[in-house]
Every structure is written in C-alpha cells, then in structure tokens.
Image (cartoon, grey):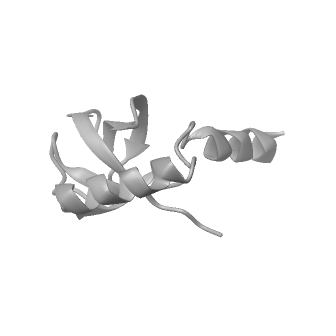
Amino acid sequence: MCLAIPAEILELKAAGQALVSVNGIRRVVNTELTPEARPGDYVVLHVGYALGVIDEAEARRTLALLETEGALADPFEDHERAALEAAS
C-alpha cells in the first residue's frame, strides 16, 4: 500500500528542494513536481517527493485522521529504512 501524507513547506532550499514538516518532524524533500509551492503551502508527500499542492483545511483533516490511526509516529521512518536497505 502506498501512502501520501500532507506536509507543510517551511522553507525553500536549493533548486527543487524544500524543508517540510509533518507532525513536527522536519525533512528536506524534492519539490521538482510542485514548482509553484511556497512556504506555508501544504503538499502531498510520497517517498520524499512533493506530488501536488493541497488545501490547508484538507491537509489538516488528513493529518488528524492519520494521527488517530497512529500513522504519524515518524512518517519518514519507512522511507528512510527502505532507502538504506536499497543502498546495501
């Protein structure tokens, strides 16, 4: 199953990258698919890529639902583990 989660853009970084926050956890992600995204916007994030800009109200509803399901303990954990396994 694939899961895309809302992330708030905190800061634009080098070309095609931004610092985002999901449930207080910050990571740098690829924003090449969402060049229109700006700090304060919410994007749908999947395996380190921002796939599209979404409405803040929808982002907050989705985050609340994911939190009640326990899916936000560390939303980046599975992605990072998969990347490490692929590199070995």
Q: Residue furthest front?
A: 68
Please provide percent x and percent y for residue 55. 18, 62
Q: Is residue 12 left or right of residue 3?
A: left
Q: Quadrant of residue 14?
A: top left
Does residue 43 lie above or below 17 as drawn? below
Please provide percent x and percent y for residue 46. 49, 57
Please provide percent x and percent y for residue 41. 18, 49
* Residue pictured at 19% horizontal, 58% vertical: 57
Q: Residue furthest right?
A: 88
Q: Examine the rendering and report whether any part of residue 48 can be seen.
A: no
Q: Quadrant of residue 27?
A: top left
Q: Is residue 55 left or right of residue 3?
A: left
* Residue pictured at 49% horizontal, 50% vertical: 68
Does residue 30 lie above or below 27 as drawn? below
Q: Nearer the viewer, residue 9 or 68?
A: 68
Q: Examine the rendering and report whether any part of residue 86 can be seen.
A: yes
Q: Quadrant of residue 17?
A: top left
The image quadrant where one finds the C terminus is top right
Please provide percent x and percent y for residue 62. 37, 59
| Figure disc tally | 0
The image quadrant where one finds the N terminus is bottom right
* Residue pictured at 72% horizontal, 47% vertical: 82
